[in-house]
Image (cartoon, rainbow, N blue to C red):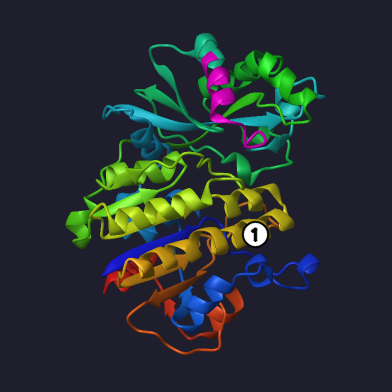
Amino acid sequence: MKYVIVLGDGMADRPIEELGGLTPLEYAKTPEMDALAKAGEIGMVHTIPDGMSPGSDTANLSVLGYDPKVYYSGRSPLEALSIGVDMKPTDVSLRCNIVTLSEDEENYEDRKILDHSSGEISTEEAAVLIEAVKKGLETELYKFYVGTSYRHLLIWDGGQVVDLTPPHDVLGQTIGQYLPKDAKLREMMKKSYEILVNHPINAARKKKGLNPANSCWFWGAGTRPALSSFEEKTGLKGAMVSAVDLLKGIAVGASMKNLTVEGANGGLNTNYEGKAQAAVDALTKEGCDFVYVHLEAPDEMGHQGSVKKKVQAIENLDARVIAPIKAGLAKAGEDFRMLVMPDHPTPICLRTHTGDSVPYLLYDSTDIQNHDWKYNEREAEKSGHSIAKGCEMIDYLIK
């Protein structure tokens, strides 16, 4: 038996008037997911432990079977694992987004955060900007590392795990009250704006009508993580397919194989087919028992507040990831169980994460059922199936 999780990051939502009172998942054309639902099981699962922040970090750890209450030490340390940073016990890691701030205000504190991803800036452009920041701000105590797209890293030697605000939680708001209380972090963010605002890359982006990446934003502080081996935990040899450092870092920490897919970028125009093929190859040719396929696009479109693009991201996941994985495993003659779910909701109306329960779909190629439901939030809630702790989902998948 082979096992697959297809994770549509932030895919769950709330009813939207523009869609006739439907959620994006209800509105989207998803014939593959609906067919799997009719032949399988749908229900609701609570992925975020009570009292914890509803982030992709806590949620994805939970889906993989790692109780965040036990294993979570911060978001950016997981990303540090992906980037290859060997954190010392005294290090604190912080996510360093390069974001878009408004530029009309005189004082830095009066600016508004317009875009947490700087228009999903390319890694190539972002690397040049981070290099400029490094030259201006890096010291023995503060080291910058390039990640992917807008997601980068700051390592603070001898630092503290301070309370910091995720930029996607305060989109459109004046930043002053959300800046770090720590004077040095606050000063570096302000100076990063001075370094980046007139950088040639940002001048060129503005000429093209693109959002400039004009400031660093620190958040997600944490200490060195310690995850147990996924294979020792489950008995399954696992692999990760993702474009984002958070998921790659979780895979490194869990001793899973990271599968690199050319053109996978965490955005709406990622290489969907390449991700699907990588998953099929891992399960049918490379000796893996389990693959976790992570799609960032629904979450990014939720943060952007784009109803149309979130629907498109869900439809892409259905037609260009789930369909070819199912077909590829069937063609290879493999029995398999596939779990499809979000990690958390990212409602369009809020443009950030919530800790609400999410719908799951579980399909077993050896146990075909016959239901009349479709896969979406509303019908999953009515199904009568629910799992209270997300970290138990992996055991439910592999029985």
**Quadrant into which the C terminus falls:** bottom left
Residue type marked 1? Pro
Q: Residue at x 62, y 68 (%)?
A: 25
348 shown above or below 78: below
Residues 125 and 249: in front is 125
Q: Residue 197: percent from the left, percent from the top?
A: 70, 18
189 shown above or below 172: above
Q: Residue 239: percent from the left, percent from the top?
A: 31, 51
Q: Which residue is drawn at 47% across and 71% down?
A: 360
Q: Residue at x 71, y 23 (%)?
A: 108
Q: Can residue 199 be seen in this view?
A: no
When asked about the image quadrant of residue 382, the answer is: bottom right
Q: Residue 213: percent from the left, percent from the top?
A: 65, 26
Q: Residue 321: percent from the left, percent from the top?
A: 50, 59
The magenta-colored residue range is 117-131
Q: Is residue 173 left or right of residue 191?
A: right
Question: According to the image, label 1 marks what residue?
Answer: 347
Magenta stretch contains residue 187: no
Q: In this view, does 314 lie to the left or right of 325?
A: right
Q: In this view, does 105 lie to the left or right of 230?
A: right
Q: Mark 1 falls on what kind of element?
A: loop
Q: Is residue 306 left or right of residue 76?
A: right
Q: Is residue 336 visible?
A: yes
Residues 172 and 122: in front is 122
Q: Main secondary structure of the magenta part?
A: helix
**Quadrant into which the N terminus falls:** bottom left
Dot 1 alpha-carbon crowd within 10 angstroms: few under 14, some 14 to 19, many 20 or more:
many
Residue reaching furthest to the front: 331
Residues 197 and 155: in front is 197
The number of callouts visible is: 1
